[in-house]
Image: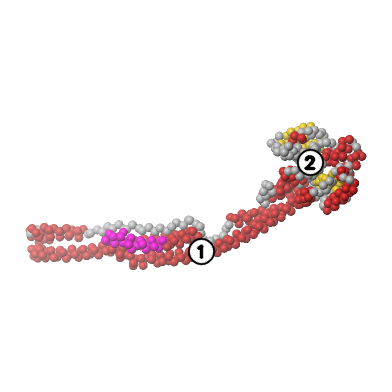
Amino acid sequence: MKTSDDHLINISNTLNDAIEVLSLDDDSSLKKDILSLGNYCQNKNFRLAVFAPFNYGKSTLLNALLGEKTLPIDLIPTTGAAIYVKYGEQLKTKITLNDGQIIEQEGTNILKQYATLDDNRCMNQEVNSVEVYCNHSLLKMGVEFLDLPGTNDREEQNQLVKDQLLTSDLIIQVVDARKLMTLEERENFRDWLLNRGINSVILVINFLNLLEPQEQKDVYYRLRFVAESFRSNLPSGFSNLYRVDALPALRAKLKGDNNGVQTSGLSMFESALQTIIIQQKEESSFRRKRFDKISEQVKAIALNQKDNLIKKIENIEQKLDKEKEIKQKAQQVINQGFQRYLSDFYSWLYLPKLLNQYQNELAIALEQNTFQQWCDNHFCNKIITYQNHINEWGNKACFFFENDDLTSLNISIPEPPEISISVSAEIEEESNYLDNITTVGIPTGIGFLLGGPMAAAVLGGASYLLNKTTTQAEKEAITQNSQNSSTYVKLAQNYLTHFSEQVFLSLRKYEQELVKIMDIPHTLHSSEVAQLSDKIQRLDDLLTRL
């Protein structure tokens, strides 16, 4: 091929990438066209395809061009596969099956088994490709013929024809002079050919010999108007409409009847066809327009997808902005409610106030061993009330901001302090001594006989001794009670101080966690936006490459 081959291969690779970028479905006609173009640019031969509805004589025309009855022809739809006719020294057929098996045989009799429609007019599903090799001057020039199934039979065959036309350099559309151009043929002209950039098309009128002379003129005039309205991309000076009576041309070729070949119109068509092929092969960009047409379709879809993605991102960003605004308002409301109760709790926990309110009654409860009763009736209820209000606002934050990472505030009440009050040894000794005096000395009178402290009874009598001892004990007891009370007060102070410090720490930690829960990024992130932006970038890259 020419120097444009590498460029077309690059375009084909870009179009293949577009299949993924545009997310084209497997049954997408554009995807099939792109894959067909990939095969097209790899083909080094100049491919000439013949297509028409069933029984229009396309296989007969190809046989006439080849000069022998190479392809199957009959009065029923026969061509059931795309048959590639290529150059070979000897006439032979090569069948490639879907499982990779290759069947080669001399002649073309094997075509009846693998390349014709079955009794249900269906193509052989086992066949991947059919190739016929024969010795012909055009084929030797690097030309290959392509015989296609009829287009008015089944949709499966129609699709095969569509796919194969895009891989052909020159199209011959056979027209039945008895039917002019049907609506289907005109639609094929527009949808199958022009809309896909296929404009190297030649119309060949068949069966004109079956009409009366005046009818022949009328039909040819009408088809000339159709052909001229169709802007074929052919070399200057060449018509895109020819008359060939296919069956008489084939018969004349097989008999070697040159006069019959000329009368059938085949000689003029062959001469024009050979010149057109030679000139188009020399034009390095003759395949380019096919790729340009498909590229334009890809660009249009890519631009449309890009616009839709941009609008989608704008909608998402508007939604995110609205969401951010709502979250900011919610954050403000939740924070105000939370701070109100938090401030009240902090105020209640303020140590001077806490001591002033609870220290004395806690000291009494400790002294009277009623700590749990005091705690249940006066202390715990207050704590639980504050705790519940704070957790309520925390739960609202978790619900609204869809975050369950916040651990509920759970304030534990410390165990009461261990109380150990000791009486001095002297007081205990005096107390024991007094017990001896009162229980032993007085009832028995033995005290007068004792020495030591009891000798004072001699001077002052027993009543003096008893009065003096009692007064000292009372004084010691009062002193001891005062010391005990001071100890309980100190224990209460320490207890409340420790409690206040621990709760302050818990509240600060809870507040910090709550702030994290309600944190709103400066720019809300959306994974969907990131994915859409990435898709836009890929579309931009594709458009740049195209």
Res. 501 visible in picture: no
Residue at the far top: name it: 106
Of circles 1 and 2, which is in front? 2
Mark 1 touching mark 2, by CB under 8 A?
A: no
* Residue at the (63%, 54%) spot, across then down: 534
**Count of marks placed on residues:** 2
Q: Looking at this view, is 129 or 12 the one in front?
A: 129
Q: Is residue 393 left or right of residue 15?
A: left
Look at the image and say whether residue 390 sits in the magenta stretch: no
Q: Tell me the kind of residue under disc 2.
A: Asp
Query: Where are the magenta residues, as a range?
Result: 365-388
Marks 1 and 2 sit apart, C-alpha to C-alpha, by 73 Å
From the top left corner, tell me how far across and down residue 307 is, in percent: 67, 58
Q: Is residue 141 left or right of residue 317?
A: right
Q: Residues within 10 Å of mark 2 (few under 14, many from 20)?
A: many
* Residue at the (78%, 44%) spot, across then down: 53
Q: Is residue 319 above or below residue 256?
A: below
Residue carrying label 2: 147
* Residue at the (67%, 48%) spot, across then down: 25
